[in-house]
């Protein structure tokens, strides 16, 4: 979590802000992220490269990994400035109660983006075999391992949005994560 330090006389107060998902209008992700940055908020708009065909050519473009969403770290009790940014629809939550995104999920998405490995949006998964990356640029990240078109993909999920991201990894980098109460028998991975 982001920590801001305020000095009140001789006393230092540590304020911790959570990450929230902002639902934004279609194709407003970049505009909202730019406005958040201009207003001094820490935001996250993870992108991926996609090859698109026009009538006369192919072009490589960057698209949001989570279309319609921008992640932002802010004080929930002072959310009006965030909600007043053009393109922001609401803060994602249950009913009218915004819910923070789990810090480990944000950290995993940030590590994936920083790694430079190929990534793409992926259908949300709740069940499967959890693995931990033991080597490479994503060392320490946990997710679900799947086989896809002959390559291994680590699927990272943002539970609140029910969206996922698949990132290509080397099979030698991963180790199974034992589930609580697991018997410790052999673990097999399902190929999709």
Image (cartoon, rainbow, N blue to C red):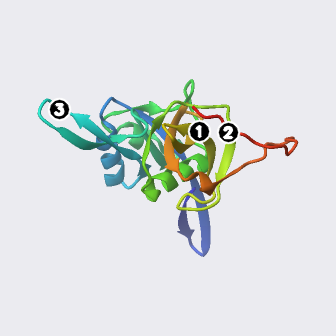
Residue under the point 57% across and 73% down:
9
Q: Quadrant of residue 99?
A: top right
Of pointers 2 and 1, the one earlier in the residue sequence: 1
* Residue shown at the point (61%, 42%) measured from the top left: 145
Q: Nearer the viewer, mark 3 or mark 1?
A: 1
Q: Which residue is the site of mark 3?
A: 54
Residue at the disc numbered 2 = 189
- The residue under label 1 is 146
Q: Is residue 90 left or right of residue 102?
A: left
Q: Residues within 10 Å of mark 2 (few under 14, many from 20)?
A: some
Q: Nearer the viewer, mark 2 or mark 3?
A: 2
Give how far across and how far down residue 45 sits, in percent: 40, 46
CB atoms of marks 2 and 1 within 8 Å? yes
- Quadrant placement of the N terminus: bottom right
| Residue occupying image coordinates x 31% and y 48% | 34
Please, is residue 120 above or below residue 116 in the view?
Answer: above
The furthest residue to the top: 95
Q: Across the whole image, how many numbered discs are drawn on residues? A: 3
The part of the image, by quadrant, that contains residue 134 is: bottom right
Locate residue 135 relative to residue 72 in the image: left or right.
Answer: right
Q: Is residue 157 visible?
A: no
Q: Can residue 65 be seen by looking at this rendering? A: yes
Q: Is residue 106 left or right of residue 82?
A: right
SS category of the residue bearing label 2: loop
Which is more N-terminal, label 1 or label 3? 3
Mark 3 and mark 1: Cα distance apart in space: 32 Å
- Residue 84 lies, in percent from the top left, at 36, 37
Disc 1 on helix, strand or loop?
strand
Q: Residues within 10 Å of mark 3 (few under 14, many from 20)?
A: few
């Amino acid at each position: 979590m982001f920590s801001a330090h305020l000095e009140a006389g001789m006393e230092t107060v540590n304020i911790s802000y959570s990450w929230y998902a902002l639902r934004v209008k279609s194709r407003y992700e970049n505009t909202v992220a730019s406005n958040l940055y201009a207003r001094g908020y820490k935001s996250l708009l993870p992108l991926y490269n996609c090859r698109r065909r026009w009538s006369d050519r192919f072009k490589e473009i960057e698209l949001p990994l989570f279309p319609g969403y921008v992640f932002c770290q802010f004080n929930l009790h002072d959310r009006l400035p965030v909600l007043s940014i053009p393109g922001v629809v609401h803060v994602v939550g249950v009913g009218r109660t915004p819910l923070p995104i789990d810090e480990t999920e944000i950290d995993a998405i940030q590590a994936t983006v920083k790694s430079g490995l190929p990534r793409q949006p992926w259908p949300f998964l709740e069940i499967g075999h959890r693995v931990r990356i033991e080597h490479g640029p994503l060392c320490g990240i946990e997710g679900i391992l799947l086989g896809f078109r002959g390559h291994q993909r680590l699927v990272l999920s943002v539970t609140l949005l029910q969206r996922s991201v698949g990132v290509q990894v080397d099979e030698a980098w991963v180790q199974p994560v034992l589930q609580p109460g697991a018997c410790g028998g052999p673990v097999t991975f399902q190929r999709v």
